[in-house]
Amino acid sequence: MAAVALGMPTLRSRTRGAPSTDGRPDTAALVDRFGRVARDLRISITEKCSLRCTYCMPAEGLPAIPREDLLTPTEIGRLVRLAVGTLGIRDVRFTGGEPLMRPDLAEIVRRSRAAAPGIPISMTTNAIGLDKRVHELVEAGLSRVNISLDSVDREDFARLTRRDRLPDVLAGVRAALTAGLAPVKLNAVLMPETLAGASDLLAWAVDHGCHLRFIEQMPLDADERWRREDLVAADRLLSVLGERFDLRAVGREDPSAPAEEWLVDGGPQTVGIIASVTRSFCGDCDRTRLTAEGTVRSCLFGNDETDLRALLRSGGDEQAVDEAVLAAWQGAMWAKPFAHGSDRDELADPQSFARTERSMGAIGG
Ligand code: SAM
Ligand code: SF4
C-alpha cells in the first residue's frame, strides 16, 4: 500500500456538506478506503493555552479564534450524540490548546456525558488549574485525564514550556490522583534537552503511581524548528532509561494503541513509548478529530477539513441537519489518506515536504 506523499503544499480546504463517498460501503461507521474504522474521537475545544511548549506553540501563542467561531457546549454535545449514537465512536477525549482555558469546560463535559452515558470521556491537559476544578469535572462526568509533563526539573520545564509553572502542574497531577481519576497517564514529548532528565521523570511517575508515556516529537511545532536529525528516537530513550531501570518489552495493550509498553523493574508499572515518527502506526489508526471551530480532520497531518459547524448552524430541520452532519463526517473519513509520511527518508530534508498549515496546538493532539 503506498503512503500518501506530503510533497506538495495544499490549501486547507473547507468542505460544506458531504465529500465524495464513491465506493463507500453502506455502513454508519466511520470507515476509510484502507479498511480502518474510527472509534476514537478527539475534540479540540480551544486554541488558548497557559504554556508555550516549544514543540507546539509559538512564543506569542496562536492567533485567537473569535468566540463565536468556537463550538458551543450544546453543539459539542450534539456532535458527541451523533458520533457515539450513530457513528460507532467508543472513546471521546477533549484536547486543545489547553481544555482548562475554557471556563465552560464542565458544561461541555456535562453535555457530552448526557449525550453518551456509557463511554469514557477524558481530557488531555497540562493540568494547570486542575486542582481547583477537578471535582466539578468529575461530577460533570469526566472519566480520565492524560497529563502532559515533560520534566520534573523546574528549570528544564520552564525552558521547554517558556513558563515557570512546574509546581502548578504537579499540583494538578496530585489533584487528579486524589479525585480518583485513575489511571492518570502522563505524556512526555521526547526532546534532546530533556533526555537526561527522562529517568528522573520515570522515577517520579512510578513513585506517584502514574503511567508515563514518551512521545517522539512530530513536525507539528508552530515555529517549524523540527528537524529529523534532532529527533530523539525511541531506541535512544530506551538505552538511557535502561541505565537505571530494568525494562522488559510487553508489546501493545491493543493493536490500535499507539504506545509500546515496557515493564519497569519487574512491574507492575509500565512505561510506554509512542514512536510516532520512527515506527509509524498509521495502518492501525482509529482516530477522527474535530477542531475547536467544528471541522473534521481525518488525519493529524492532512490539511483537509470538513465543516460541520456550518451545517449545525444552517438553521434547517433538526433531523435533516443531523443527517447532513453524519454524511459529511462519514465522507471526510472515507477520504482519509493512508499515512502521514513523516517516517519517509526524504523528510530528512526539511524543504522536501509541506508542513500542515496548523500546528499541534491548533489541531489538538
Ligand atoms: N494542552 C494539552 C496538553 O498539553 O496536554 C492538550 C493539547 S496538546 C497539543 C496534546 C498533546 O500533544 C500533548 O501531550 C503534547 O505533549 C502533544 N504534542 C504537542 N506538540 C507535539 C509535537 N510536536 N509532537 C508530539 N507531540 C506533541
Ligand atoms: Fe499548550 Fe499543550 Fe501545546 Fe504545551 S502541548 S503549548 S500545554 S497546547
Image (spheres, helix red, strand yellow):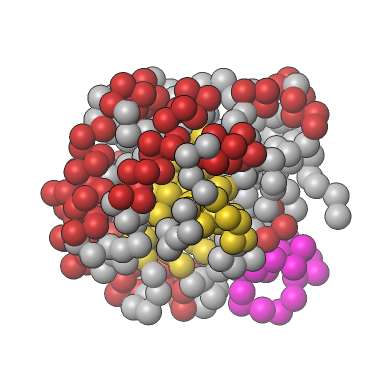
Q: Is residue 142 left or right of residue 220?
A: left
Name above or below for residue 275 compared with residue 311: above
Q: Position of residue 223 (x, y in %)?
A: 51, 21
> Count of labels shown?
0
Viewer-nearest residue: 177 or 163: 177
Q: Position of residue 252 (x, y in %)?
A: 60, 62
Query: Does residue 306 appear anywhere in the picture?
Result: no
Viewer-nearest residue: 272 or 5: 272
Q: Is residue 28 left or right of residue 8?
A: left
Q: Is residue 176 left or right of residue 151?
A: left
Q: Quadrant of the N terminus?
A: bottom right
Residue at the image position 35 percent from the left and 48 percent from the top: 205
Q: Position of residue 26 (x, y in %)?
A: 71, 79
Query: Does residue 351 appear anywhere in the picture?
Result: yes
Viewer-nearest residue: 129 or 8: 129
Q: Position of residue 57 (x, y in %)?
A: 43, 28
Where, by quadrant of the figure, is residue 316 drawn? bottom left
Residue at the image position 18 percent from the left and 67 percent from the top: 139
**Quick check: is 13 in the magenta stretch?**
no
Q: Residue furthest right?
A: 1
Q: Is residue 193 left or right of residue 11?
A: left
Residue at the image position 32 percent from the left and 56 percent from the top: 209
Where, by quadrant of the figure, is residue 32 drawn? bottom right
Residue at the image position 45 percent from the left and 60 percent from the top: 267
Q: Which residues are magenta?
A: 20-37
**Quick check: is 25 in the magenta stretch?**
yes
Most common secondary structure along the magenta stretch: loop
